[in-house]
Amino acid sequence: MVGRAATMPDDIPTLRRILRSARTVAVVGLSAEWHRPSFFAAKYMQEHGYRIIPVNPRYPEILGERCHASLETIDVPVDIVDVFRRTEDVLPIAKQAIAIGAKCFWQQIGVKNLEAAQLAAEAGLDVVMDRCVKIEHARLFGGLHWAGVNTGVVSARRGH
């Protein structure tokens, strides 16, 4: 689900606008574990020019950036709040996203809190639900290939 009213499931122009205009992404629930989806997505976005601000009270730093215990301690403008938390934990995060003036409230694949989405949309934020920011960026800006990913980790090339 994408858009201001959170009603359009495949609004490619809105996704392009969000990802093209954003530069700072606060990732709520970002893990420091390299194999976790949140780390993989954040690292990809960082490698594509986005500033990643980790939000997880468990760690002092992730991906070279200071971790924050909550969105409220971030002292720079945030374009996208990207949420890697359980659906039932999302509503307070939406309220924080509104309070800090974020432009987009993005719920990752498998996360669909309709109440949080509606609250964010009514506050004027763009809302994306049940989508991966990394997959959407790669799909819309050329990072997906025939296998579906382009990590550079697995390759058929021989190292001669």
Image: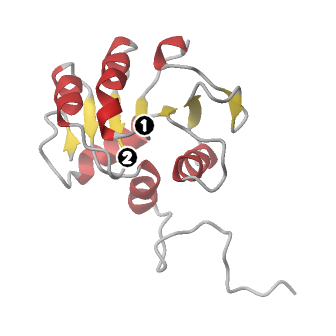
Residue beneath the point at 54% across and 16% down: 74
The dot on residue 82 is 1
Of the two numbered discs 2 and 1 on the same chain, state the one appearing first in sequence.
1
Q: Name the colouring of the figure.
A: secondary structure
Q: Position of residue 30 (x, y in %)?
A: 55, 38
Which residue bears the numbered disc 2?
108
- Residue drawn at (62%, 56%) of the image: 35
Amino acid type, mark 1 = Asp
Residue 156 in the image, given as x and y percentages of width and height: 68, 86
Q: Is residue 114 left or right of residue 107?
A: left
Residue at 20 percent of width and 51 percent of height: 11
Give how far apart the Cα atoms at labels 2 and 1 are.
Answer: 7 Å
Q: Position of residue 120 (x, y in %)?
A: 24, 25
Residues at discs 2 and 1 in contact (Cβ within 8 Å): yes
> What is the x, y in percent for residue 32?
66, 42
Which amino acid type corresponds to the residue marked 2 in the rendered image? Gln
